[in-house]
Image (spheres, rainbow, N blue to C red):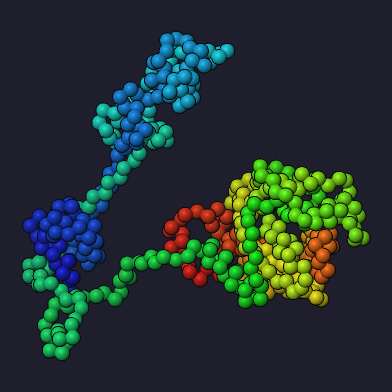
Amino acid sequence: MELTLNEKRLLVALEATGSVDAAVLAEKMDARREAVVQYANLAGERGLVDVDKHVSRRYVPTEEGRAYMEKGLPERQVLESFEETIPMRDLQRHPLAKIAIGWMRKKGWIAIRDGVVEKTGRTAPGPDEAAFARLSESGAIEDGVGVGDLVKRGLAIEEETVAYTVSITPRGRELLSGGLDLREEVETLTREQILSGEWKDLPLRRYDVTKLPRRAYPGKTHPYQRIIDEMRRTLFDMGFEEMAGGIVQSSFWNFDALFQPQDHPAREMQDTFFLGERWPLPAGYERVRDMHEHGGETSSTGWGGTWSAAKAEQCVLRTHTTSLSIQHLASHPTPPVKAFCIGRVYRREAVDPTHLAEFEQLEGIVMDEGVNFRHLLGFLKEFYAKMGFEKVRFRPGYFPYTEPSVEPEVYVDGLGWVELGGAGIFREEVTAPFGIEHKVLAWGLGISRVAMLRLGLRDLRQLYRSDVEWVRETPTYGGRR
């Protein structure tokens, strides 16, 4: 049996003792403990040694726990700071009152009536206090009754200690009896050793080609960012240019310019993050106002009512990147225009596995002579095909600023048809105030949902967590189905 030099040194170190702690063995071998454990595990696979792992756990105080050691838990300190009764307002002046009052009530030590705190007389120490007393006395305790409560309160923390005992086996002793060559192994041959033939007599290091090497974790782009970059490259390849803009937008550009009525539910606080800032309206805003009130110079009748300039000036965190599309069109009113934006948007959503308060959206617009609804569907189908979704279908949808409108869906094995955004042709009420005379194809797609499907996730929040292990394990090709 061919052994590595480290395995030979390990057996020699064990020859006298037979069984020893890995830390002691490391001193004998003049090596790191971790390295000795690795050598022992390799030798264990050959049946030369036995490696026993011993895990012990103990609990030590946290910084907050140490602060209470001399005087006791906060609730005990506060309880002992007054006689039988005390006005609540006076008790709240105690430095530990915010922590202690809730715990005293939970433990049944006090009752509060008409603003007065009264002791109940049931103030015997509980399991947590008994555990904390042991912790204060010894500085570290084993697991036991009450310890879990201290951990939950952040007063103690678990420490784990791992020890290894290495023992030589009969097979290892048999190899020792035959003698071992402890000369340093040669890892790399020199030119001179090869030409002279000296390499034939050298103790060359053996390599087991059946063993997997230690995994290397090079730096790499986050899986979600890779998908965003892939989308950006795809759109560039399709002939689009990129547009950009700030996350803070006035309500004028975020809502009014897109012909969303000022009493639309999307403007309510439960959907939108409103800010205290106000921005002045752009030159020519009157055309948008007239469009809302009576349809301006078009055949539209508008929304009616009185349009409020003050409401349009109010700033918001953009709820969609469509606000950038209309600004881009306002500054580029003549064709051809073919632009996209990938940016973060903000909405007051209840956070759960499929919804977040902030997420990325892909916005696209195409304006040119002769474009129509079929071109829109073609662009979307081509884009999704490049993203790896072969089956795409469209169903009718409604959006205040497009007509006709559709919601594209892709087919995913195991999930069925999944809706991925909205699209349509900008209404005349959106384009006319800015002098745009040609049809504008527009779409807004949820990037995070595409990423979930591509990466096989069930929780949208995974895309934004700093989970190093997940980043390491996710294939660099992006997990395309």
Query: Taking 181 as reference, is 217 left or right?
Result: right
> At x 33% / y 70%, what residue is drawn?
212
Q: Is 424 in front, or is 307?
A: 307
Q: Nearer the viewer, residue 280 or 73?
A: 280
Which of 299 and 133 lies nearest the eye of the viewer? 299
Q: Residue at x 16, y 56 (%)?
A: 26
- Can the viewer see residue 171 in this picture? no
User: Would you place residue 142 above or below residue 112 in this image?
Assistant: below
Residue 217, percent from left and from top: 38, 65
Q: Quadrant of residue 214?
A: bottom left
150 vs 345, nearest the viewer: 345
Seen in the image, is 383 located left or right of residue 104? right
Q: Position of residue 301 (x, y in %)?
A: 91, 55
Quadrant containing the C terminus in the rendered view = bottom right
- State whether residue 379 is above or below residue 286: below
Q: Image quarter for residue 373?
A: bottom right
Q: Position of residue 229 (x, y in %)?
A: 56, 68
136 with respect to 105 (left or right): left
Instruction: Give me the residue at 47% from left, 19% from top.
Output: 93
